[in-house]
Image: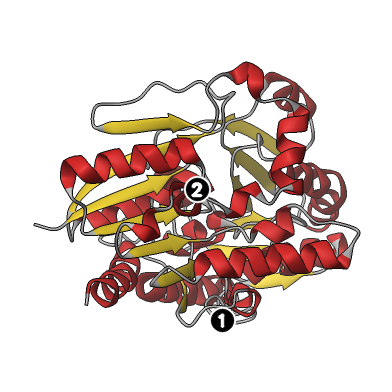
Amino acid sequence: MKRVLFISESRPEPGNGTGERVLSIYNALHKLAEVHLLIVLPPNLAYSPKPGENVVHLLDSPDMATSWYWRKRNLLFSDYRSDHRVARKVASLHEERNFDLFFGRLQCPILGDCARLGPSVIDLDIIPMERVTSVLPVVNRLRRAALCRSLARFKCVFVPKRSDTAKISHPNVQVLPCISTQPTEASPLGPGDSRDRMLFVGGLAWPPNAEGLMRFVEKSLPIVRRRLPNTVLRIVGRINDAQMAALRGREGVEVVGFVSDLAAEYRRADVCICPIWRGERANVKLAEYAGFGRAIVATAFSALGYEGILEPGRDLLTANSDEALADCCVELLANEHRRQRLAQSARTVALRMLSQDAIDRSIQQAVDQALR
């Protein structure tokens, strides 16, 4: 059996967008090879390794992770060059196990210099130049050139969005959409069990989630309730005490928090919302909503993460303002036929393009090409 070293900034586990993406890739690799996991962490992050996990920090001590350290990384373009601690760890693991392939997340494989040791694939779900920009255009151009030079050694570069392909100069850039591992393909939920119930699923620790949800509660939900007074918005996900206090007591809002049975929440929902107005990543909640076969209302910005996959008007409704977002919700809550048609279309797309099977096919193709 082939051996793969999977290099990631987090362990594969459900519950958030990054964890879901890592888990979907890990699941696909695990079907093809014996997978060993290396977690690359910033110096100031505590971590308890599970059996079989290898961990390496970017610095020897958390005390060394000063603000100047992070500024220096940007000034010296350190994120586009091999980090000697990570490279030593990767080389040591390779000497022990003789990996056939290296599969890395973000800049981790660049830091680990794994492309010098064997065929390597990278999943670049955030374009580094977009996270850190400079007011000097020449610096941004130099960063882009440094990234492209580092990526040139990789057999394949995965990005999550179609719009990202134009930002990367590489002969083999592939789109690997973000999916949720939560929906079960064998158990379609059917129509919602409850009238006039909207659902938001997402942890509020991520600022775009918290900001977008509060904006919807303050600006869009009152419009919906003026036209459909019985409408209720249920909020599911990890929420801190301050956020809980800010949401509780608002008319038409039910704060649930973390739940162990997501399918039950989706089963009772008529419409799922994604009121996200900013951020770098694809909003994996859209893939999850579609996988569970729910009608979706989203901002046009959040839908860009699935451009070319989930089609506005066919699979979901999108809007560019708070009022338009409310109008879309009212339209679907009041029109069951329209609601079910969109939900069924979204689920069909999810089964074909936003499922573990779809990720498996893309990963297998990339691995086969890399090892050829």
Query: Camera-side residue: 146 or 50?
Result: 146
Q: Are marks 2 and 1 in contact (CB under 8 Å)?
A: no
Can residue 84 be seen at all in this image of the molecule? yes
Mark 1, residues whose alpha carbon is within 10 Å: few (<14), some, or many (≥20)? Answer: few
Circle 2 residue: 111
| Residue at the image point whose x is 49% and y is 54% from the top | 110
Residue 168 in percent (x, y) is at: 60, 74
Can residue 160 be seen at all in this image of the molecule? no
Residue 33 in percent (x, y) is at: 17, 56
Give the tally of numbered discs: 2
Q: Please, what is the three-letter code of the amino acid marked with disc 1?
A: Gly
Residue 174 in percent (x, y) is at: 46, 76
Q: CA distance from mark 2 to mark 1?
A: 32 Å
Q: Quadrant of the N terminus?
A: bottom left
| Residue at the image point whose x is 32% and y is 68% from the top | 363
SS for dot 2: helix
| Residue at the image point whose x is 74% and y is 65% from the top | 142
Query: Camera-side residue: 290 or 254?
Result: 290
The answer to whether 111 is drawn above or below residue 70 in the figure is below
Q: Quadrant of the C terminus?
A: bottom left
Is residue 340 shown left or right of residue 211?
Answer: left
Residue 21 in percent (x, y) is at: 44, 53
Sequence order check: which comes first, mark 2 or mark 1?
A: 2
Query: Camera-side residue: 66 or 278?
Result: 66
Classify residue 308 by image quadrant.
bottom right
The answer to whether 331 is drawn above or below residue 112 in the figure is below
Q: Please, what is the three-letter code of the amino acid marked with disc 2?
A: Leu
Circle 1 residue: 308
> Colour mode?
secondary structure
Viewer-side label of 2, 1 = 2
